[in-house]
Image (tube, rainbow, N blue to C red):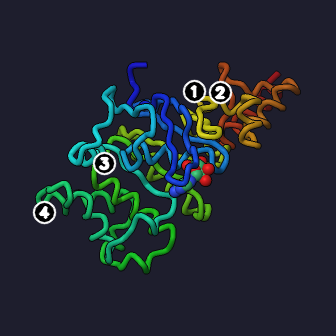
Amino acid sequence: MTDVLLKLEQVSYRYPDGTNALSGCSLVIRQGKRTVVLGANGAGKTTMFLHLNGILRPSAGQVFYGGVPLDYSRSGIRELRSRIGLVFQNPDSQLFSASVREDVSFGPMNLGLEKRIVGERVAAALHAVRMTECADKPVHNLSYGQKKRVCIAGVLAMQPGLIVLDEPMSGLDAAMQRELLAVLERLHADGMTVVIATHDLDFAYEWADDAIVLQKGKLLAQGTAAVLLQQTEVQAELGASPVIADIAASLALTGMAVRDKGYLPRSRRELLAAISAFHRQESDR
Ligand SMILES: Nc1ncnc2c1ncn2[C@@H]1O[C@H](COP(=O)(O)OP(=O)(O)O)[C@@H](O)[C@H]1O
Ligand SMILES: [Mg+2]
């Protein structure tokens, strides 16, 4: 594959207490794609993410960015962090400044950018997550969803090419999830590579280009999300299946042609459109 942005090659990681969180894990993340990382609790998703921007260093194996092994020197890590933005699951472990603006400024300031440039980046990042109004609010007064968006703004202010989000939808209500998704869609449309760890298979099926499935610190499967999520082995490991895939498959069994040029509907909207199209065709006969 020519468009590989990040690659893990036989990465193992053992925590100081002796837990083997990753064992010979190999996978790739493709440039410009939307990738979901799936796996049961404890499968190693978070540990894998911490390897992508050099917070953790493999006990064995290697991580490559653009075909080059990661450089764990101080300057190497600094450069890596400006290219790969990691949004933690819990916003409280990411935010530490008094005000929103201060927090979002921290990364670009550390890059040694001019004050004016920092200001511009912070304004753009806050605008991207629709948090401009809250720029001067104390971080501790924000709602959970707002904190999440400030974390994303902090990462965007670094202008990374890849954004990695660890279970970003957890703890958000449906409206906030939609809003966050809209933010991610805009970033992806602007060319950003987006990687998300999630337990929501319906979301994964509808949204992702690629999927990575981890099992006990190893890669179980990797490939086109819509294809992988229909595989029995993957569904068994995840203990669930996307509801739209199930409905489309069972309608297809009844002879209803929901498949359009070999493509099964992936969202509620596509499924309903396919069913209406089928009924129109039937009544035209
Ligand atoms: N700081 C830590 N110290 C020791 N073990 C840890 C630590 N963090 C995670 N683990 C263990 O590593 C394994 C993988 O965890 P994690 O990467 O958090 O999985 P996931 O994000 O898929 O739930 C689990 O067995 C977990 O208990
Ligand atoms: Mg995790």
Tell whether label 1 touches label 2 (CB within 8 Å). Answer: yes
The label nearer to you, 3 versus 2, is 3
Mark carried by residue 115? 4
Q: Quadrant of residue 127?
A: bottom left
Q: Position of residue 187 (x, y in %)?
A: 39, 46
Mark before the other along the chain sequence, 1 or 3: 3
The label shown at residue 223 is 1
User: Which callout, 3 or 2, points at the residue further toward the start of the chain?
Assistant: 3
Of badges 2 and 1, the one in the foreground is 1
Q: Is residue 37 above or below residue 152?
A: above
> Which mark sits nearer the N-terminus, 4 or 1?
4
Left or right, 9 with respect to 204, comes to left
| Local crowd size for mark 2, using a 10 Å CA cut-off: few (<14), some (14–19), many (≥20) | few
The amino acid type found where label 1 is placed reads: Gly
Residue pointed to by mark 3? 81
Residue ID for mark 2: 227
**Alpha-carbon distance for marks 1 and 3?**
26 Å
Q: Earlier in the sequence, mark 4 or mark 3?
A: 3
Question: Whole-Å distance between the Cαs marked 4 and 1?
Answer: 43 Å
Please indicate whether residue 221 sits to the left or right of residue 279 in the image: left
The N terminus - image quarter = top left
Q: Amino acid at mark 2?
A: Val
Question: Hey, what amino acid is under mark 3?
Answer: Arg
Residue 228 in the image: state x and y as whole percent: 65, 29
